[in-house]
């Protein structure tokens, strides 16, 4: 409980000092208690950075979410799919959160592979490339591996460093905040904030379990292999005709 409270305080400070509240308040004003809370959290002796007037509100919102890390990026990804909530312009600005995030270094990637898979697997990897794609949860590298003397081209997907720990600590803190809001502002109970945050936690943890993605890939490979069979293709054709 103490750890969650500390994490929540840190997240609150980040939100309060960002553009997020200023921008989202234009769509729907938060309850007075929440506004006062974030005003207190935003207090600082440091000079506040000037607004980036060369960027519109959608870009500033996107930048703010991106700077706050994976947990808020996942929130941004959700909002990017809901133009009915934030408008088409904002949702299009948030799309870059889905697949165009700064990668972590190749040295970190190598260290993760060595730590998680062991030296034998690490040493079988040849020519690990720089990241070719980076998202909020993981990034992808091209590589060659030595599979018992056979050199194969592969793609390697690597989770961001400490992402599971960081995400779950932050999402638990946000869940605590949702519980506090529901407890003190009765009309928010109909929004089921705690359930929404819990659902985001479950979905993201599934996304971070790359074993599910491997299973999907294997299933697709089996289907593609079957599609090469002429008899199977004829069978599919018969089914389509009957429909």
Image (cartoon, rainbow, N blue to C red):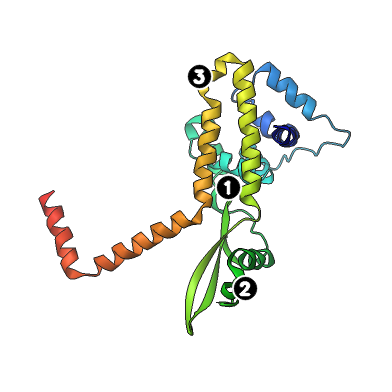
Front of the two marks 2 and 1 = 2
Residue tagged 2: 119
* Rendered residue at 50%/68% (across/down): 155
Residue at position x 74%, y 26% from top? 38
Along the viewing direction, whichever of 144 and 82 lies nearer the viewer: 144
Q: Is residue 14 toward the left or the right of residue 183 in the image?
A: right
Farthest top residue? 186
Residue that mark 3 sits on: 190
- The secondary element bearing badge 2 is classed as helix
- Position of 224 with respect to 177 (left or right) is left
**In front here: 243 or 53?**
243
Is tag 2's residue or tag 1's residue first in the polypeptide sequence? 1
Please identify the quarter of the rendering in which residue 13 is found. Answer: top right
Which dot marks residue 64? Answer: none
- In the image as oriented, which residue stretches furthest toward the bottom? 149
Give the SS element for disc 3.
helix
Q: Which residue is mark 1?
A: 97
Q: CA distance from mark 2 to mark 1?
A: 33 Å
Residue 128 position by quadrant: bottom right
- How many angstroms separate mark 2 from mark 3 (CA)? 52 Å
Residue found 83% across the figure and 29% down from its top: 43
On the question of residue 29 being in view, the answer is no
User: How would you rate the neighbour count of disc 3 (Cα within 10 Å): few for under 14, some for 14-19, many for 20 or more?
Assistant: few
Q: Quadrant of residue 183?
A: top right
Q: From the top left corner, tell me how far across and down residue 9 is, in percent.
A: 74, 32
Q: Is residue 97 visible?
A: yes
From this view, report whether residue 207 is shown above or below residue 133: above
Residue occupying the point 63% across, 68% down: 114
Tell whether label 3 touches label 1 (CB within 8 Å).
no
Judge from the rendering whether residue 205 lies leftward or rightward of residue 19; answer left or right: left
Labelled pair 2, 3 in contact (Cβ < 8 Å): no
């Amino acid at each position: 409980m103490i750890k969650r409270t500390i994490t929540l305080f840190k997240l609150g400070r980040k939100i309060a000092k960002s553009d997020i509240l200023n921008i989202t308040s234009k769509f729907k004003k938060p309850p007075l208690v929440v506004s006062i809370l974030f005003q207190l959290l935003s207090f600082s002796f440091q000079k506040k950075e000037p607004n980036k007037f060369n960027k519109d509100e959608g870009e500033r919102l996107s930048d703010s979410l991106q700077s706050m890390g994976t947990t808020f990026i996942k929130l941004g990804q959700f909002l990017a799919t809901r133009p009915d909530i934030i408008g088409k312009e904002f949702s299009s600005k948030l799309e870059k959160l889905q697949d165009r995030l700064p990668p972590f270094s190749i040295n970190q990637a190598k260290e993760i592979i060595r730590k998680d898979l062991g030296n034998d697997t690490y040493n079988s990897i040849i020519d690990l490339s720089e990241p070719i794609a980076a998202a909020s949860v993981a990034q992808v590298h091209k590589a060659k591996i030595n599979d018992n003397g056979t050199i194969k081209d592969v793609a390697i997907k690597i989770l961001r460093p400490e992402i599971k720990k960081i995400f779950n600590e932050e999402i638990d803190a946000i869940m605590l905040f949702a519980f506090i809001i529901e407890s003190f502002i009765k009309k928010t109970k109909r929004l089921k904030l705690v359930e929404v945050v819990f659902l985001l936690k479950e979905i993201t943890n599934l996304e971070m379990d790359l074993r599910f993605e491997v299973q999907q890939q294997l299933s697709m490979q089996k289907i593609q292999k079957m599609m090469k069979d002429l008899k199977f293709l004829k069978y599919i054709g018969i089914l389509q005709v009957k429909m």
